[in-house]
Amino acid sequence: MSLTATRLDPWRWLGAPMLQCMAATILFSLPVRVFGWGLPEPIFCMAPAFAWAIIRPSMVAPFGVLIMGLFLDIFWGAPLGLWALSLLVAYGAVLGTRNMMVGQSRPMMWMWFAAACAVAQMVGFLITQLDARATPNLLAMLWQFLATILLYPFAHRLIDRFDDADVRFR
Amino acid sequence: MSFRDNPLGEIRVPLVWTAGVALVVAVIVAVTLLLGDRRETLRNEAYGVTREVSDAVAAPVSGVVSAPVHWLGALSDGISQYFFAVSENRRLRAEAAAAAELRQEVLGLRDLNERYRDLLGLQTDPPIPMVSARVVSDSRGPFANTRLANAGRERQVRVGNPVMTEYGLVGRVVGVTRGASRVLLLTDIASRTPVMVDRTNARAILAGDGGPNPKLEYLRGYEPVKAGDRIVTSGDGGLMPRGLPVGVAVKGVDGAWRVVLSSEAGAIDFVRILLFEDFAQLVDQDELNTRSEPPADGALPTVGVTSPPPPTPAPTPAPSRTPAPVNRPPPAKAPVAKAPTPKAPAPKTPAAKTTPTPRPAPNQPAATPAPAPPPVEEPVF
């Protein structure tokens, strides 16, 4: 167990990915246009939220997801709690079904990641409908969904790195 | 005895359960924050200290991060200008020739317009001061479309100020802190802007939905808009000046009228924040909302119609040093004596507190004009 505790250092599997996602979000929020097109705006925080739920249940991870969601809300100017709740619901859905996902092939895991992204987007859609009393643009949601599911390799790398760290949850 | 030997040491709450409890607590926190958030108001205190602090931190950080991008953009612009100098020169010469003709026409129209205004006595809007700012961050998702500009409270930017580029309206300020202001774009799902069709003056509300082309809602009338119509701000509601260019009307694939925003014609890297203050923002709202007390006799003041003079007690007649003639009518009654002429200047006091202008009753006998009628307010003893 001592070996596990050393390998599954909270800073390495929780803190560092969280900060990397925040930095990537800031970087992709630059007002840049390439050939008339702005940068895509994927939800970088979906990658660690998905990977943390797959690696192992944790008491700290939900609060990490909460912090990342609140950061997105404040930085993007969304209603406070929108992305926090969306990410937490997606995290909870993955945590509840992780027994089905663990050990599956990479393409299959990619599909599970897309499903988790769809859950987060759907929660965001419902909250926005209730908050603004208007229907968000489905095409804009589709673009963000497609940009986000392309981030699965980052989540897979995190899973690969820490999946075997705690043998109790293999 | 070691910890492992302690029988209580074996009683451990399963980690899955504790993770679930932590998740529930985090969800409760998120829901509480969501219910307590009031993003879309025009009150600065509703923006919240958290957002103000985060914007104040994010603006310089994003400014530093975006600086190399701006440098690279300037460099690429310089290179392209060098390579396309000849064609650019030809285009500019043609534009200058066309502009020379237009200039004469504009000068004539401006002169004519000023004369018409003088004749009609129109009061034109005062020029609007503005501050320039650089956009340092940009969110483009379906649920939030905002930008962070690096000009804030220290430059008199206030919540509600319209924001423009050289092409057209971008949005309005929804949060201000020191050194930064948050701009809600026209495309944000919470954005509602009163606009009108320039050709027909038909009013509509421009409603964002997170996509690039916001919708025109609440259009009235028979064919109030057609494709290619220019859309400008209507100024209704007093939050924005009238006539700011917004975009061009197009028919969306969903059948709704949408607007291709003029501001999308170029990169939104620099913006102008209009320090616009409508008369509604300048007046003292407390004073304006003060209810005037009805007169003592219960007669309600009418709006737009002058009411008969309120009955006031007749003043004590001034002791005359010479005896009054016999056929002289009784002393002038107070309302008649203090009735102002129609050309009297408007009172300086607010309208809400003024009493209706009295006028002489038609069936009242006209008082003989005294040589110097004493004012009622200051009776001469």
Image (tube, rainbow, N blue to C red):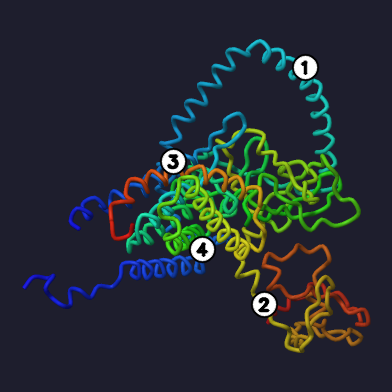
Q: CA distance from mark 2 to mark 1?
A: 61 Å
Q: Is residue B60 visible?
A: no
In the picture provided, is B19 more to the left or to the right than B353? Answer: left
Q: CA distance from mark 4 to mark 2?
A: 28 Å
Name the mark nearer the viewer: 2 or 3: 3
Q: Earlier in the sequence, mark 2 or mark 1?
A: 1
Chain on which label 3 sits: B
Q: Are marks 2 and 3 in contact (CB under 8 Å)?
A: no
Callout 1 secondary element:
helix
Q: Earlier in the sequence, mark 4 or mark 2?
A: 4
Residue at x 64%, y 35% (from the top left corner): B166
Q: Is residue A112 visible?
A: yes
The disc labelled 4 sits on which kind of residue?
Answer: Ala
Residue linked to disc 3: B62
Residue linked to disc 2: B291
Residue at x 63%, y 33% (from the top left corner): B266
The disc labelled 1 sits on which kind of residue?
Answer: Ala
Q: Earlier in the sequence, mark 2 or mark 3?
A: 3
Q: Earlier in the sequence, mark 3 or mark 1?
A: 3
Q: Earlier in the sequence, mark 1 or mark 4?
A: 4
Residue linked to disc 4: B46
Q: Are marks 3 and 1 in contact (CB under 8 Å)?
A: no
Q: Nearer the viewer, residue B137 or B105?
A: B137
Residue at x 20%, y 58% (from the top left corner): A1
Considering every residue shown, the one lying at the far right of the view is: B363
